[in-house]
Every structure is written in C-alpha cells, then in structure tokens.
Image (tube, rainbow, N blue to C red):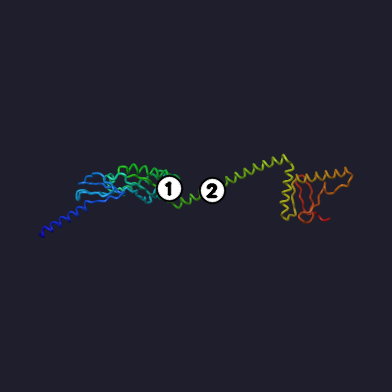
C-alpha cells in the first residue's frame, strides 16, 4: 500500500513537472522560434504555448526597436583631418528565424558592422561635408547596414551621427575663418551703403541744379546747425556770399535810382554779430568768405 501511494505521488509530481516544463508564455512584443530535436519548425505567436519537454526548445525573440549607441571612432576625413565621430543606430528584428539561425549574436554583429561602416562612410567625405551633410551620411550608413543585415532578419530603421569632436587646432582655424567671413560681409555691407549714399547724393545734386534756391536753403540750414554751438568763426559757402553781394548791389542800385542815400555795408563788407559775441566782418571772396572778429576802430 505504501509503495502504491509513493508511486502515485511520483506520477503526480512528474506530471506537474512535465506540465511546467511544457508551458511557455510568449509576450506580445515577442515571437517564439520552435526547435524540435535541433530542427527549426517555425515561429509561435504571442500567448500561451505548449511544447514537448526535453524534445522542443522555444527561443523567444524580441521584435521591439533596439537603440544601440555606436562608440566614438577616430576617423581621418578625405582632406586628412582627424575627427572623433560617435553615432546611434536603431534596428528591429523582422525575421525571427533568421535572427536565431543565421547569426549567433545579432546585437554584437550589428554593433561591429556599424562601427566599420561609420569609419568607411565618414572617411569618404571632407570635414566641411561631414559637418554640413550629416543627413546624407546618415542615409549612406543606413543603406550599407540594410544590405548587410537583411540576411540576418534585421532591419535598420535609423542611423544618426551623435557627436563630432574636432582637434583644438582645427577649432581655432575654423574660428578665424568664421571671423574673416563676418568681416568680409561687414565690408561688403559698408560698401553697398556707400554706393547707395553716393547715388542718393547724386540725385540730390540733380534736384539742386534744377532748383538753385534749394542749395541756398540748404546753406542756410547748415548755418542754423552750426549756430547751435557757440562758435565765433563761420565759413560761408561761396554761392551764398555771391548771393548776398548781388542782393546788396541790387538794393544799392534801387536806392540810387530812387534818389535815396546809399546803404553802406550791403555791397561791401557786412558788420554782424554771431551768438552775441564781438562784431564780425563778413567779406565776399571768389572762392569763399570768412567771417571773423572785426578789428577795432
């Protein structure tokens, strides 16, 4: 009787143990690859799966996108500049059977081939292209990886250059280049401003030639601006002095014709006061007239 009870208990234990060994759970983001006596029979979808203990082996393969950093690589560009470039790759398994059967460790393989591909692609570009055409480099690396990993059942979804480290000497050279470029643009802008100013002055001179009084008004405005400061000496433009002399001659001629005495100072020197200072004498000249303090007596 005791032997029977022991046998029953042993059978129950074996059944429970066999049930535990035969039940597998495949998660939603996984796919199971079933091997029976070492031969791949196919895949098993997510859910509760039953296998034959000690005969079947179920490998679970994750189908989620994997983020793999590519460690910094010392690379010499096409123009012989040494740079350190690091990147990051994103990939996922699309064929679970190939990822288990075709290669021993798919993650290590992708890491190694991504490093070599990064050195190969960046080495074909110059430094300026590496810094400015990162999208093209990313696309080239991804295309090469896709060709290599398609037999492993893996799809590379994205590759991005993460960091580009330059030597200190190259950083200083690029800083000098950027400064020279800014100075060049500043000089070009200044020259364009001078050209526009010259064109505007030319148009203004044409207008003044068509309207002579405009020049006289401008001269008077200049005198007003000069008079803001407490100056004792004023340089009058020749056209203004010529106009004053002509005006004095005209008034003298009109008074002579009218039989009135001459008004001194209109046709000759003019005595005036500037900003409340000492009297000054204004005398017309051929080129210009200078007004200064009048001599005593």
Which of the labelled discs sits on residue 125, or is there none? none
Left or right placement of residue 114 versus residue 127 in this view: left
- Dot 1 or dot 2: first in sequence order is 1
Q: Residue furthest right?
A: 259
Residue linked to disc 1: 81
Percent position of residue 293, x then y: 78, 54
Mark 1, Cα crowd under 10 Å, few <14 / some 14-19 / many 20+, is: some
Percent position of residue 290, x then y: 76, 50
Left or right placement of residue 26 versus residue 208 in this view: left
Whether residue 253 is situated above or below residue 16 in the rendered picture: above
Q: Residue at x 74, y 51 (%)?
A: 234
Which of the labelled discs sits on residue 182, or is there none? 2
Q: Residue furthest front?
A: 1
* Residue sitting nearer the eye, 51 or 152: 51
Give the position of the N terminus as an image quadrant.
Answer: bottom left
Q: Residue furthest left?
A: 1
| Label 1 element class | loop
Q: Quadrant of residue 286?
A: top right
* Residue sitting nearer the eye, 52 or 102: 52
Distance Cα–Cα, label 1 vs label 2: 24 Å
Q: Nearer the viewer, mark 1 or mark 2?
A: 2
* Residue sitting nearer the eye, 36 or 71: 36
């Amino acid at each position: 009787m005791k032997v029977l009870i022991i046998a029953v208990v042993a059978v129950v234990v074996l059944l429970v143990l066999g049930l535990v060994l035969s039940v597998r759970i495949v998660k939603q983001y996984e796919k199971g690859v079933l091997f029976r006596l070492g031969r791949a029979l196919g895949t098993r979808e997510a859910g509760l799966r039953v296998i034959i203990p000690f005969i079947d082996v179920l490998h679970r393969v994750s189908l989620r996108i994997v983020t793999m950093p590519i460690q910094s690589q010392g690379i010499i560009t096409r123009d012989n500049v040494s740079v350190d470039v690091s990147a990051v790759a994103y990939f996922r398994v699309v064929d679970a059977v190939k990822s288990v059967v075709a290669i021993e460790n798919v993650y290590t393989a992708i890491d190694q081939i991504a490093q070599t591909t990064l050195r190969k692609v960046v080495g074909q570009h110059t430094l300026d292209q590496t810094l400015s055409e990162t999208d093209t480099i990313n696309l080239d690396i991804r295309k090469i990886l896709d060709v290599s990993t398609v037999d492993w059942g893996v799809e590379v979804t994205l590759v991005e250059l993460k960091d580009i480290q330059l030597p200190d000497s190259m950083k200083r050279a690029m800083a000098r280049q950027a400064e020279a470029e800014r100075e060049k643009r500043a000089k070009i802008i200044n020259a364009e401003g001078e050209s526009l100013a010259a064109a505007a002055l030319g148009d203004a001179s044409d207008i003044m030639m068509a309207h002579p009084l405009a020049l006289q008004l401008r001269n008077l405005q200049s005198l007003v601006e000069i008079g803001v400061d407490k100056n004792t000496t004023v340089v009058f433009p020749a056209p203004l002095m010529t106009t004053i002399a002509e005006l004095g001659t005209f008034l003298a001629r009109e008074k002579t014709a009218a039989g009135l005495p001459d008004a001194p100072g209109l046709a000759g020197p003019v005595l005036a006061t500037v900003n409340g200072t000492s009297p000054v004498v204004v005398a017309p000249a051929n080129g210009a007239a200078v007004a200064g303090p009048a001599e005593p007596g």
